[in-house]
């Protein structure tokens, strides 16, 4: 299975060649605004992150989110990435992260579709029991996308992150396998 296919997107394994896109996305101020890490990131740091990620099990490798090129229906263009990380196989739990880096694809349902595909993959292929995420409380469109995909609010980490001279609450959201199946 080289790809995970959705209605409008496909997910594929990340390659070294994708680092330039990843680096451009994480160093874009608007994109980084909703990411839970500190930018800017150098090429050296991004390459080291990629190399260390590739040493982890395949289930924790980054997947590239692609959409069909409107000018050439045979080609796909990358718009972001997603990943399960910190998988705890004993309890069947994994954290998930997503980044839609191409801003022209924001607010068009690609985040929701990606999360639904990842939930399907996580529950039906990896046999996970619980998939969870962290999101800034101020990221209303992200929260809405996660809710549409089936995530439920669990609680918050009050003043859990610091950005632009202010503390921000971080929400925790999750989906359990039996909730997702019903």
Image (cartoon, rainbow, N blue to C red):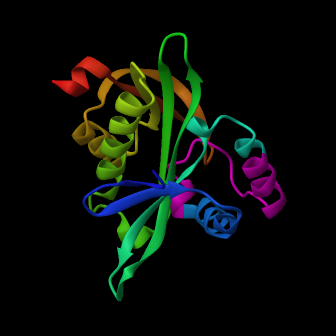
User: Would you say residue 171 is visible in this rendering?
Assistant: no
Query: In this picture, is 20 found above or below 160?
Result: below
* Residue at (36% x, 63% y) in the render: 106
Residues rendered magenta in the picture: 30-51
Residue 23 versus residue 63: which sits nearer the camera? 63
Q: Position of residue 29 (x, y in %)?
A: 58, 63
Query: Which of the 4 image quadrants contains residue 123?
Result: top left
Q: Position of residue 91 (x, y in %)?
A: 49, 11
* Residue at (43% x, 68% y) in the render: 103
Q: Position of residue 37 (x, y in %)?
A: 64, 44
Q: Residue furthest top?
A: 90
Residue 37 drawn in magenta = yes
Q: Position of residue 94 (x, y in %)?
A: 50, 26
* Residue at (68% x, 47% y) in the render: 38
Left or right for 117, reference 36:
left
Query: Which of the 4 image quadrants contains residue 182?
Result: top left
* Residue at (71% x, 45% y) in the render: 54
Left or right for 116, reference 57:
left
Residue 178 versus residue 5: which sits nearer the camera? 5
């Amino acid at each position: 299975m080289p790809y995970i296919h959705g209605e409008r997107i496909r997910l594929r394994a990340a390659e070294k060649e994708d680092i330039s896109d990843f680096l451009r996305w994480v160093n874009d101020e608007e994109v980084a605004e909703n990411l839970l890490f500190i930018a800017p990131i150098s090429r050296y740091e991004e390459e080291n992150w990629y190399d260390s990620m590739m040493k982890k099990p395949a289930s924790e490798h980054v997947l590239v989110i692609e959409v069909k090129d409107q000018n050439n229906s045979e080609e796909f263009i990358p718009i972001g990435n997603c990943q399960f990380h910190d998988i705890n196989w004993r309890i069947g739990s994994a954290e998930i992260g997503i980044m839609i880096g191409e801003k022209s694809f924001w607010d068009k349902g690609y985040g929701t579709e990606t999360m639904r595909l990842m939930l399907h993959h996580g529950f039906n292929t990896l046999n996970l029991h619980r998939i969870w995420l962290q999101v800034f409380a101020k990221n209303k469109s992200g929260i809405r996308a996660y809710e549409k995909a089936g995530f439920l609010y669990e609680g918050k980490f009050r003043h859990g992150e610091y950005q632009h001279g202010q503390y921000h609450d971080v929400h925790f959201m999750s989906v359990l396998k039996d909730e997702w199946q019903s």
